[in-house]
Image (cartoon, grey):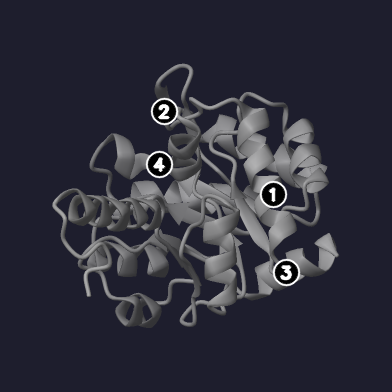
Amino acid sequence: MTSTRTDLLRALHQPGDPLILPNVWDVGSATIVAEAGYPALATASASIAAMLGYDDHEGAPVDEMLDIAAKIIRAVDVPVTVDAEAGYGLPPAELVERLTAIGAAGFNIEELDHRAGSLLDVDTQAARIAALRAASRDLVINARVDLFLVGSPSVEEVAERARRYLEAGADCVFPMLAPSEDVIGELVQAIPGPVNVTCLPGMNLSRLAALGVARVSFGPMTYLAALDALKAMSNRILSAQDPYGT
């Protein structure tokens, strides 16, 4: 079953007809998104960590993070790609083994070293991706490029890292928080493989598709939208207004 879901997840990455992934954080959110008709799901580590009461960036214990991912995977009948952050310090073979054991179809891997508080050099990260690929011929590896998180890189700097990670065995690359549609268009042209992006406020899904992206996700923004809805209802209740806003 896992292999079938993995094959489906990989096939859904179509430049120009992107896989759309409203990120989920628990069984309830996963069920809602799956029942809406999305063909695959993606977890958001920031949302799961916040739900569990921890900081983002590997502040939550790996066992708790993977336990939530496992519950999500068991609850739905579509492929789930897991946000594995920077790998939680696990050796590549162990990370792949644990993701495979819970039924993940794929995973994100960051190039940040959260313990050192810095970006890994490209050679180190490429070698790690190669080791992850060697440990699993099946799981869809989504290699994040995190340069936009630490500075204002050129398109070529981002594209060079992306190319190295594709050569090392990543299935697709994720220039995290690419800041504009114009930059995304340049990245798609410069990277010889599926490009995944975050749909930031002000971006348009049809435009991103036309630019040739293969996957679009929303990170913690779905979780924050759910909290906003709860906050609004809580305020209505407290002020003795109609709780349902009708």
> As shown in the figure, which amino acid type bears the numbered disc 3?
Asp
Q: Give the labeled residue for mark 2.
A: 55
**Height in image: 240 above or below 49?**
below
> As shown in the figure, which amino acid type bears the numbered disc 2?
Asp
> As shown in the figure, which amino acid type bears the numbered disc 1?
Lys
| Percent coordinates x, y for residue 157 in the rendering | 36, 46
Asked which secondary structure carries label 1, the reply is: helix
Mark 2 → mark 3, Cα distance in angstroms: 30 Å
Instruction: Name the quadrant of the C terminus.
Output: bottom left
Q: Give the labeled residue for mark 4.
A: 146
Which badge, 1 or 4, comes first in the chain's sequence? 1
Q: Nearer the viewer, mark 2 or mark 4?
A: 2
Which badge, 2 or 4, comes first in the chain's sequence? 2
Q: Give the labeled residue for mark 1.
A: 71
> As shown in the figure, which amino acid type bears the numbered disc 4?
Asp
Label 1 crowd bin: few (<14), some (14–19), many (20+), radius 10 Å: some
Mark 1 → mark 4, Cα distance in angstroms: 28 Å
- Identity of the residue drawn at 57% across and 61% down: 30
Q: Nearer the viewer, mark 1 or mark 2?
A: 1
Q: Give the labeled residue for mark 3.
A: 77
Label 3 crowd bin: few (<14), some (14–19), many (20+), radius 10 Å: some
- Identity of the residue drawn at 72% across and 53% down: 104
Which badge, 3 or 1, comes first in the chain's sequence? 1
